[in-house]
Image: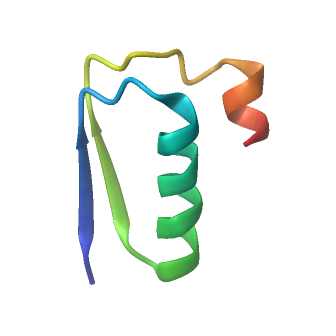
């Protein structure tokens, strides 16, 4: 199993793509703060 780490991600759509990728492959995604966006944003939650 792979582990993917995003250090201080700033682009929400790229992070959304990574979330979908790890969900489909069974990998783990780790997001290291500070994030450049709010995870509760409706646009990100929809992605």
Residue 9 pos. (x, y %): 33, 30
For the point 49% across and 43% down, the residue is 14
Residue 31 pos. (x, y %): 31, 39
Task: Please name whichever residue, 14 or 40, is drawn nearer the observer in this view of the structure.
Answer: 14
Residue 38 pos. (x, y %): 53, 15
Task: Please name whichever residue, 24 or 11, is drawn nearer the observer in this view of the structure.
Answer: 11
Judge from the rendering whether residue 20 lies leftward or rightward of residue 25; answer left or right. right
Judge from the rendering whether residue 27 lies leftward or rightward of residue 20; answer left or right. left
Q: Quadrant of residue 29?
A: bottom left
For the point 59% across and 61% down, the residue is 20
Query: Where the N terminus falls, by quadrant?
Result: bottom left
Total numbered badges shown on the rendered structure? 0
For the point 58% across and 37% down, the residue is 13
Query: Where the C terminus falls, by quadrant?
Result: top right
45 versus 36 height, above or below: below
8 versus 1 height, above or below: above
For the point 57% across and 45% down, the residue is 16
Judge from the rendering whether residue 13 lies leftward or rightward of residue 11; answer left or right. right
Residue 43 pos. (x, y %): 75, 26
Task: Please name whichever residue, 13 or 44, is drawn nearer the observer in this view of the structure.
Answer: 13
Judge from the rendering whether residue 39 lies leftward or rightward of residue 47; answer left or right. left
């Amino acid at each position: 199993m792979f582990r993917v780490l995003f250090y201080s991600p700033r682009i929400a759509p790229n992070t959304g793509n990574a979330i979908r990728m790890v969900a489909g492959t069974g990998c783990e995604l780790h997001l290291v703060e500070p994030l450049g966006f709010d995870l509760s944003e409706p646009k990100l939650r929809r992605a």
